[in-house]
Image (cartoon, coloured by chain):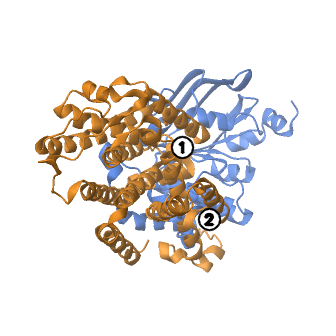
Chain colours: A blue, B orange
Amino acid sequence: MTNILEVNNVSKYFGGVKANEDISLNIEQGSIVGLIGPNGSGKTTLFNSIVGTHPIDKGSIKFEGTELSTLLVNEIPPLGLLRTFQQTKIYGQMTCMMNMKISKKTSNNYFSMFEKIPKELDEEAEQILSFVGLYEKRHLRAGELSFGQQKLLELAMALMNEPKMLMLDEPTAGINPTLINGIIDRLIKINDKYKITLFVIEHNMRVVMNLVQHVYCMAHGKLLADGKPEEIKNNKKVIDAYLGAH
Amino acid sequence: MSDKKEITGLTFLILLGLFSPLVLPNYRVQLSELWIFMVFASTWNIQGGKMGYNSFGNIIFFGLGMYICASTQIAYAFDLAEWTEAGGVKTFVHSTSQYFSSLPLGLILAGLIPALIAGVLGSLLLGLRGHYFAIGTLGLGIAAGEFATSVQIWGGGMGMTVPVWPKVDGKDLEIFGGSMNFFYSLSFLLFVMVFFTLRWLYKTRFGLILTAIRDNEDKAEAMGVPTMRYKVSGWIVSAFFMGIAGGLYGNINGYIEPTEVAFAGATFGVYMVLMTILGGKGTLWGPIIGAIIFQVFKEFFWTYFLGWQSVALGFLIIIIVVFFPEGLMGWLRGKRPEWFGEIVDKNARLAQVKINTND
């Protein structure tokens, strides 16, 4: 299998803080990969580095062979790589349907700016909203939704964009425990049906164990270990990092 | 707004446009100003309302347009330096054909050059966000006024006169109902152009992306939207219409002064913000309603309570901020959401998220 994303020796420093140091990881096309680690271990920084939120100090990041570290934030999603946020980012004053419709990928030429939103998108948006369980709320303003519902909306918006790979920053945080099984099911379906590669930051070990095929574990800005979920679960270093025995 | 209400609103505006100068012939200057003010508010609303970028710099496009239009009109027939040096003492009179061929040219340039400048300035300034953008543009507006004061060919701090309406045998030319009606009609026409351009723009992807930028610019970027391009394009649209408005206003006023008329940040620059907020920013109709109320209010106090107008204006600002923070349209939207095409469904609000894992 080919790698869709290749991160090689990436370092990111904030002044003296080594947020990411010499991180290398590969994501296989079509897989679901997890990223775990204690708070402040540099997981979100790594996500930000990959999608170009800030420049990296060292290393290279390749998505399907294209170097990402020199691209701007808005140049990366058209390649098919999309991320969601830990703190939800949605368009609060617009309805859920509008949020969905403007998330559709368009050719970014000058004339497409002045096109009308096609009517056919309504049906597609409704379909995806019901897929994540938000169909009844489609006409509400996105800002009225609860935090957990906004997370689901963000996921739906990402699906509307039809990415090849999706990076999810804690998709189940703030979501009602009874819904978590539903989310896991949805993520597996996204991966299986839409052939979207998933790279997921997650704290909930039940989710990690049931969802991913491969896990990377970070601590103190460095990659600690990687392997199958069962191996990681029994890895001494990982247990120490999570228990805070450093 | 629903179609029916929009048609009612439009009918009202068209009737106002056509008949108000006939009913109130002595108020034609103020009525022309009203349409120009609607252009102010409607175009400021693209930045301040739709996009969430509070610009205090839109006035520079107005001032530039005013100078560019007047210079073009003059230079078409005479030597510009000689004109401004004469300071209105020597009489230069355009022939009818000179006047009516230089004016359209002046107005077109008054639109295009500020639009071009907005493109360049926008690429530099629109990278700033929130208060930083506001302060940046505020500085720009003041700098533009000071700059104009030092341009000798524009008469420096003295300002310059604008070509007068052509005369035949010592009498004002009787065409288009004379100068006042002519410029009134052009102001009304400009507003109509602005209205329909914005009405169309707000319905396209462009309008929606502007709102998205206001709500969450980081998200729009992360979804692959080249937000800079949208922001700059929005400013270009504003600058184009503000420039033409400036060209017209210079001709209505007859005299251009750098900081009091052209780059009048303390009056027009503030009015455009006030009118938009009063009416309801981010809506198509808010700025229009705001401009009408504001102009009536302003003229009433200027006429009957001269000396108290600034106090009254301050009072108006307080009332807006305290009682109508979202403007009249925002207040109405809160009271009657169904008028704005919002579907309010209690059940939707109460509905639980259900994920059916079997489908």
Q: Amino acid at mark 1?
A: Ala
Q: Is residue A222 above or below residue B205?
A: above
Query: Which percent across, then down, holds residue B15?
Result: 32, 72
Q: Nearer the viewer, residue A183 or A47?
A: A47
Q: Nearer the viewer, residue B333 or B149?
A: B149
The subunit letter for the residue under badge 1 reads B
Judged left or right of residue B38, residue B93 is left
The subunit letter for the residue under badge 2 reads B
The residue located at (84%, 35%) in the rendering is A240
Query: Which percent across, then down, holds residue B335?
Result: 59, 75
Q: Amino acid at mark 2?
A: Phe
Query: Which percent across, then down, holds residue B180?
Result: 28, 56
**Mark 2 highlights which residue?**
B324
Element at label 1: loop
**Mark 1 highlights which residue?**
B266
**How far apart in space, not on screen, are marks 1 and 2 (Cα)?**
23 Å
Q: Is residue B164 above or below residue B143?
A: below
Element at label 2: loop
**Quarter location, residue B193:** bottom left
Q: Is residue B189 above or below residue B347?
A: above
